[in-house]
Amino acid sequence: MMSADFYGRAEIWIIILALGVGTFFLRYSFLGLAGRRPLPEWALRYLRYTAVAVLPGLVAPLVLWPQATGGAPDPARLIAAAVTVLAGLATRNTLAAILGGFVSLYLALWLVG
Amino acid sequence: MTDRPSLSAAYWRGLRNGLPFMLVIVPFGTLFGVAATEAGLNLVEVMGFSVLVIAGASQFTAVQLMNDHTPALLVILTALAVNLRMAMYSASLAPHLGAAPRWQKALVAYFMIDQSFAVAAQDYERAPQQSLAEKLAYYAGACTPNCPTWYVATLAGALLGAAIPPEFALDFAVPVTFLAMIAPMLRSLPHLVAATVSVVAALVFSFLPSGLGVLVAAVLAMVAGARAETFLARRAA
């Protein structure tokens, strides 16, 4: 079943609007305070790790148990994932990593099947 | 009082510094358009995401969790957690732009993406004595090539998405894009610790209702990253 059928149009818009409004207020938060109160060091320390704390956990099951193979680990996709990470680490460049990932994915799908 | 030539110079400097990021925004936005369309969202909904949220990683997060039929509240919370870093950006821009009128700060906030923040923070640190108007002009310049491009690229992806055959394995576009975003973030040991804890905990807690495991893993990983930083700093001292 597609997401759209699962949620219905109204609920999809609730998600979009809540995410839009919430994100705006995260962005506006300290600018709105006019910089009167600098953020305490301990808070900055936690905020520094939010993206790197959420995204890897989100992607791990997608890599190990891909939907396209019904959740069975797939060599081609595992190779592509490894190449993407290595390319990203080596170049520090998101675009280079995406390119490396797709090239290796197609090569691996073609070779391994 | 800042004269017009210096404002225009600041704007163009911002634009020049922001321009290379278009190379990331175009494929990334296109992939989002494709992924969201594949998830069954219609054109208006896909564009709604890119125009109202304008934050790629959290948009991908939301669409992925929706693919898993995660309850709406958990979709919103997890995707917002991805954007918590924006509060940090806001805090670091506040000393420079905090004195601007409220409507200008609202525009700065709306257009605050990783790229505009990164170049602006660098520029303000390099030349802190710039006037408020110059700093705002620079920021506007940095946003010009990137933010509208995000909408257009999303639209292209959404229109293209349905036409791409399954042999292209676009199901894996989302994981590849996430991994490509994560790898350059792993620039210190605490970041690596946080990422590792996130992966292990997400797999361990994958039996929980979808979305919840990721959220638990994220909290553990955030604490692990912050603790690792404190630990390393103490040992170095």
Image: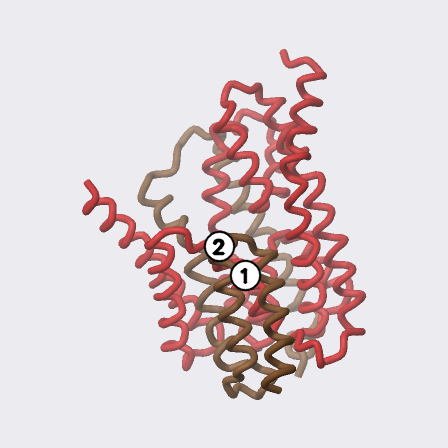
Residue B81 visible in the displayed image: no
Density class for disc 1 (Cα within 10 Å; few <14, some 14-19, many ≥20) is many
Residue highlighted by disc 2:
B184
Residue highlighted by disc 1:
B180
Name the chain letter of the residue that bears numbered label 2. B
The residue lying furthest to the top in this view is: B1
- Residue at screen point 37% across, 61% down: B219
What percent of the width, then of the height, locates residue B94?
Answer: 49, 32
- Residue at screen point 36% across, 71% down: B201
Q: Secondary structure at mark 1?
A: helix
Residue A35 visible in the displayed image: yes
Give the drawing colour for chain A. brown
- Residue at screen point 64% across, 57% down: A17
Callout 1–callout 2 Cβ contact below 8 Å: yes
Q: Secondary structure at mark 2?
A: helix
Give the drawing colour for chain B. red
